[in-house]
Amino acid sequence: MEGDIWHWIAKLTPPDESIYAGGTFYIDISFRNDYPFTPPICKFITPFYHPAVMGNSKICIRSFYHWSPALKAESVLMEIYQLFTEIFWEDC
C-alpha cells in the first residue's frame, strides 16, 4: 500500500453527538483503473454496524449509485462520515 496512490486507508473519528463517539474507524479505499469514471471501492476495516454497511464491510452510499466524475474522494469521505449520525434508508 505504501507508495500506491490508488489505495488509501482513511481514519475517521465520529462527532461527539454520534452513538459511535469515542471510536476511531479505519476505511480501506481502492480506486479502480477507470477512476474518476467509476466510484472507489470503500470498506470498513474497523467493525462498524450500520444498515449502510454490508456483511462484507462494503459501504453503500448514495453517491455510489449516482456517481459522477465530478465527485471527489473528499465528497465520498464526507458522505461516509454522515453515517455516524444518520441512516439513509433509501440507500440501504
Image (cartoon, rainbow, N blue to C red):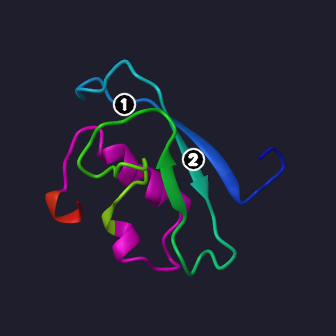
Mark 1 vs mark 2, CA separation in Å: 17 Å
Residue beneath disc 1? 14
- Is residue 81 shown left or right of residue 86? right
Q: Is residue 36 left or right of residue 17?
A: right
Residue 78, image x, y percentages: 41, 51
Assess whether residue 64 is covered by the magenta stretch.
Answer: yes
The image's mark for residue 28 is: 2
Callout 2: SS: strand
**Earlier along the polypeptide chain: callout 1 or callout 2?**
1
The image quarter containing residue 91 is bottom left
Residue 32 versus residue 55 in the image, above or below = below
Location of residue 6 in the rendering, given as x and y in whole percent from the top left corner: 71, 60
Amino acid carrying mark 2 in the image: Asp
Quick check: 62 left or right of 41? left
Could you tell me which quadrant the C terminus lies in? bottom left
Whether 80 is among the magenta residues is yes
State the image quarter where residue 21 is shown.
top left
Of discs 1 and 2, which sits in the foreground? 2
Taking the view exactly as shown, the residue that stands out farthest to the left is 89
Q: Nearer the viewer, residue 92 or 18?
A: 92
Q: Residue at x 58, y 53 (%)?
A: 29
Q: Secondary structure at mark 1?
A: loop
Q: Residue at x 41, y 33 (%)?
A: 47
Judged from this view, the residue extending furthest toward the front is 55
At 45% from the left edge and 58% from the top edge, which residue is drawn? 76
Q: Which segment is the magenta one?
A: 63-88
Q: Disc 1 marks which amino acid?
A: Pro
From the viewer's perspective, is residue 92 above or below residue 69? above
Q: Position of residue 74 (x, y in %)?
A: 51, 56
